[in-house]
Amino acid sequence: MFDALWRRFPIVLMARRNLTRARTRSALAIAAIVIGVVAIATLGIAGVAFKDAQFETLGSIGSDLQVFAGEDNDEGYLTDADIREIERATSGADLVPLKQRNADLAVGRSDGGVTVYGVENPRELYTVRDGSIPGNWRRGALVGATLADRYGLEPGNKLELDGETYRVAAVLEDEGQAAVASPNEAVVLPATAFESEGYAQVVVRSDNVDQANESAMAIRDAFNGREQQISVFERGEVSEQIDQAFAQVNLFLVGLGAISLVVAGVSIANVMLMSAIERREEIGVLRAVGYERSDVLRIMLTEATLLGVVGAFVGVLVSLGLGLVINNALLGDPLAFTTEGLRYALLGFVFGVAASALGGLYPAWKASRQRPVEALRG
Amino acid sequence: MSSNSPTDATDTTDAVKTASASSKAAGADARVIDGTNVVKEYQTGAETVRALKGLDFHIDRGEFVSIVGPSGSGKSTLLNILGLLDIPTSGTVLVDGNDVSALSETAATRLRKRVIGFVFQSFYLIPTLTARENVEVPRLLDRKPKETTARATDLLERVGLGDRLDHYPNELSGGQKQRVAIARSLINDPQIVLADEPTGNLDRETGDQILDEFDRITDEGVAVVTVTHDDYVSEFADRTVELVDGRLSDV
């Protein structure tokens, strides 16, 4: 049955037979393509997995705005009036004003420095892991996940900040290093527990980068004339820059992989040239019995492409296998393939086949130009 | 003479020899190949070598012509020109009524496929293909696998290799290989088979079988031209011409 199928594509039949004639040579040529495809696909998949792993620890950067006092702001902090101004400028976006100071933390006999945030409504920024935030929050501290783990703090425990004692009301969820006012290493207190005036920053919640950018410009317009009263930090912009940086790193990695495919293409050209020289007489016979130049060209090109298809196929399989290992190592889940990562496998396949076909072009052309008289002279 | 339309077919002594003679048999034109004042020159460095010095020749349907001559007499050059693999420097060669000098590469290839079959001294079978596939090769790209296979099988049976269809060349003896090559030369119903030293690599007995085979082909209206320096082949030929130093003479 297979035979009947092959006969429908006589050129493929001949090409396949020719390739199996010099098995080792064909296998080596295929190996070159495999290596090239694996280089592209695996580096691509690894790059994507690395990026995902980084974002897993960073957490979501989001597109919120952070507003701080500017360098020309004499107060050095944002006042209630400033917050009202921001509210006006952003026409009612969700604002979370934050106070901030550093304090000495003591839990039992251990102590250390810690960041303390003062927030009026912590639910807008944080999620609770253990315990709960009291309805009318006046006393009690919220402790970041890392800090809680380090000091073994649980809801109900006591801690001292600069000598003042607080009871732990809740332990917060791990928010990732890049979270707004990252609570992991911090203690969060009610804003009323701060004696100082004003706020260190105001977080302007925002759903997307465009909206955030609009708000940022409105805020800058409202405050900053010649003097920089406030500074606005656009998290969405940073997030885009990081994405871009990762994309560039990946492009570079895949570019390195592409070089090895170019080398593979050259090796295909070499193999096909040798094969054409070895089969000089045979090609002469084909021409003598009525094969046209284009037929010879097609046969040789098919051979090169066949090498590429087999090599690329094996290469993609190997890459997916390596992808399992990489995903497991970086993301803890072997099957954590993403569309973005798999796209590199496809890219590797296409490049592999294309490199082979290109490599076969010149030898095929050369073989087809050969005059049968000369080929048959012996 | 220039007509090659089948509707012009009238009775000719050669064409009526057998019913399977080429349908292209063209009326008064019994000649498959007709050469006039054929000259072939080669450039080797600054020197011009005249391999053929103005030959007049013709090959008729169904005749067995043996071209003999010493090495370097221009035999292979002549065979290449007869086989549309080369064109003369001057003079006219008509193959089935077509002036070979006027043909494009593609047209020459197509004419060659239709009119001419080749048998080579060293067989030139493709080692990765079976006997039957080797016979099919000239038609392999025609995309009529069933008909091609049937015809190849038939041809191999006729040369006595019906039991060797699926053998590879390295499983065949020299004589069997040459018979496969003859079957291959016939797959496209040629009007002429050109054989370059067809018995050169074979012992006498096997050579006889091959020559008998040629004899049978000519009975079917296919002309056979052999080039050889083996005088023995000439005993089987209808006509022997000698090529010496680029000039032809009847023997």
Image (cartoon, coloured by chain):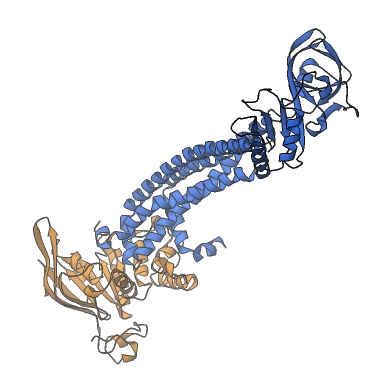
Chain colours: A blue, B orange
Quarter occupied by the C terminus of chain B: bottom left
Instruction: Specify the quadrant of the image occupied by residue A195.
Output: top right
Q: Is residue A69 above or below residue B170?
A: above
Answer above or below: position of A301 versus A118. below
Residue at 49% across, 63% down? A9
Outermost residue toward the right in this view: A135
Q: As rendered, which of B106 and A229 lies closer to the eye?
A: A229
Q: Can residue A181 be seen in this snapshot?
A: no
Look at the image and tell me whether residue A163 can be seen.
yes
Position of the N terminus of chain B, as image quadrant, is bottom left
Badge count: 0
Q: Position of residue A32 (x, y in %)?
A: 45, 42
Relative to the observer, which residue lies in front, A158 or B106? A158
Name the side, left or right, on which B143 lies relative to A107: left
Instruction: Using residue B228 as the reference point, say whether residue A276 is left or right of it.
Output: right
Q: Residue A116 is drawn in which quadrant?
A: top right
| Quadrant of res A340 | top right
> Which residue in the rendered view is the most extreme toward the front?
A226
Q: Position of residue B145 (x, y in %)?
A: 48, 70
- Residue A231 location, x and y as percent? 64, 31
Q: Residue at x 46, y 55 (%)?
A: A16
Asked whether A239 or B68 is in front, the reply is A239
Residue A105 position within the rendered picture, expressed as x and y whole percent measured from the top left = 77, 13
Q: Nearer the viewer, residue B67 or B87?
A: B87
